[in-house]
């Protein structure tokens, strides 16, 4: 990524010991991290994203950063000088009002992890590992548009920027009869950070537009975008929606039932 996208190399979480630990130790580590945020060790079924969020906050922190500060009536994950850093492992919709108000007077960076690689670990009721396998689905940068649809126009604000962390994660699953039909009852209980492989910073609509594949024709619909980027049509539609909201794409008409798009800087 060129022109404003910051990159970092692989950085292992607890790299001195992570590869040597048994899976049971990994599970306890996740529960302990979540407990540090909640004050007590939660049940596996309520772990959710707490451990991943806590680990990312520790990974992201630098000397001098202040953690969990109240700014403008909101609790902010990290304050780094005049920069507010918010880490979000889930959807962006719950943060919309908070981000809109904070960016009026402060520089705000939203940090979002994307799982490039996931290792799926099945646990017993006692939290002991039963199996581990690599998920066949590999994530990619464009996945961020699934979440960005909640706040696409914020990237037009000069005080706002988005930082993507491309990660390797462990996904912990437990069996719950009658739930998660497609996964045959195995539900996601929590996620754990293994490593941060790369970071990409997007601070403007023009930088977001660089995620468009260069092979796109001047006029294109979302089917062509999906094919050129090798992504699903639904994700291509979300990508086009976000870029239109940012003003870097505009519609030029229809081709059958499909909306035709064009880059605003295209000649």
Image (cartoon, rainbow, N blue to C red):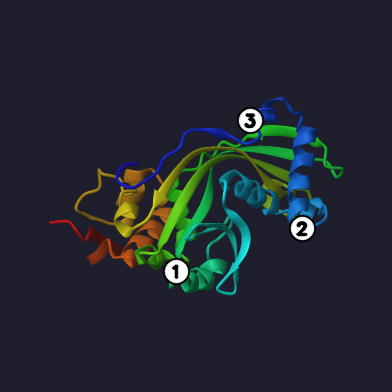
Direction from residue 206 to residue 33 in the image, left or right = right
Direction from residue 172 to residue 208 in the image, left or right = left
x%, y% of residue 257? 31, 65
Quadrant of the image for the C terminus? bottom left
Q: As rendered, which of 68 and 97 lies closer to the eye?
A: 68
Identify the residue position indicated by label 2 in the image: 38
Secondary element type, mark 3: loop
How far is mark 1 from mark 3, CA to CA? 35 Å
Identify the residue position indicated by label 3 in the image: 15
How far is mark 2 from mark 3, CA to CA? 25 Å
x%, y% of residue 231? 41, 46
Q: As rendered, which of 42 and 229 lies closer to the eye?
A: 42
**Corner quadrant of residue 91:** bottom right
**Corner quadrant of residue 118:** top right
Quadrant of the image for the N terminus? top left
Secondary element type, mark 1: loop
Secondary element type, mark 2: helix
x%, y% of residue 147? 49, 59
């Amino acid at each position: 990524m060129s022109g404003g996208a910051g990159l970092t190399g692989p950085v292992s979480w607890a790299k001195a010991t992570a590869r040597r630990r048994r899976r049971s130790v990994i599970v306890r580590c996740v529960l302990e991290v979540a407990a540090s945020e909640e004050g007590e060790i939660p049940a596996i079924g309520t772990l959710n994203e707490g451990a991943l969020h806590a680990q990312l906050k520790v990974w992201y922190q630098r000397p001098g950063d202040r953690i969990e500060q109240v700014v403008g009536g909101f609790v902010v994950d990290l304050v780094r000088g005049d920069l507010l850093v918010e880490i979000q492992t889930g959807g962006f919709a719950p943060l919309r009002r908070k981000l809109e108000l904070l960016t009026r007077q402060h520089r705000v960076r939203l940090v979002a992890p994307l799982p490039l690689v996931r290792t799926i670990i099945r646990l017993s009721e006692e939290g002991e590992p039963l199996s581990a396998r690599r998920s066949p689905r590999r994530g990619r940068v464009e996945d961020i548009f699934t979440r960005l649809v909640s706040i696409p126009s914020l990237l037009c604000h000069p005080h706002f920027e988005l930082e993507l962390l491309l990660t390797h994660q462990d996904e912990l699953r437990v069996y719950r009869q009658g739930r998660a039909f497609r996964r045959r009852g195995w539900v996601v209980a929590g996620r754990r950070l293994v490593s941060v492989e790369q970071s990409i910073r997007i601070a403007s609509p023009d930088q977001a537009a660089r995620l468009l594949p260069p092979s796109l024709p001047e006029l294109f619909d979302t089917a062509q975008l999906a094919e050129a980027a090798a992504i699903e049509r639904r994700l291509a539609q979300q990508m086009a929606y976000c870029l239109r909201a940012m003003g870097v794409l505009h519609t030029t008409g229809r081709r059958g039932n499909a909306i035709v798009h064009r880059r605003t800087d295209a000649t």
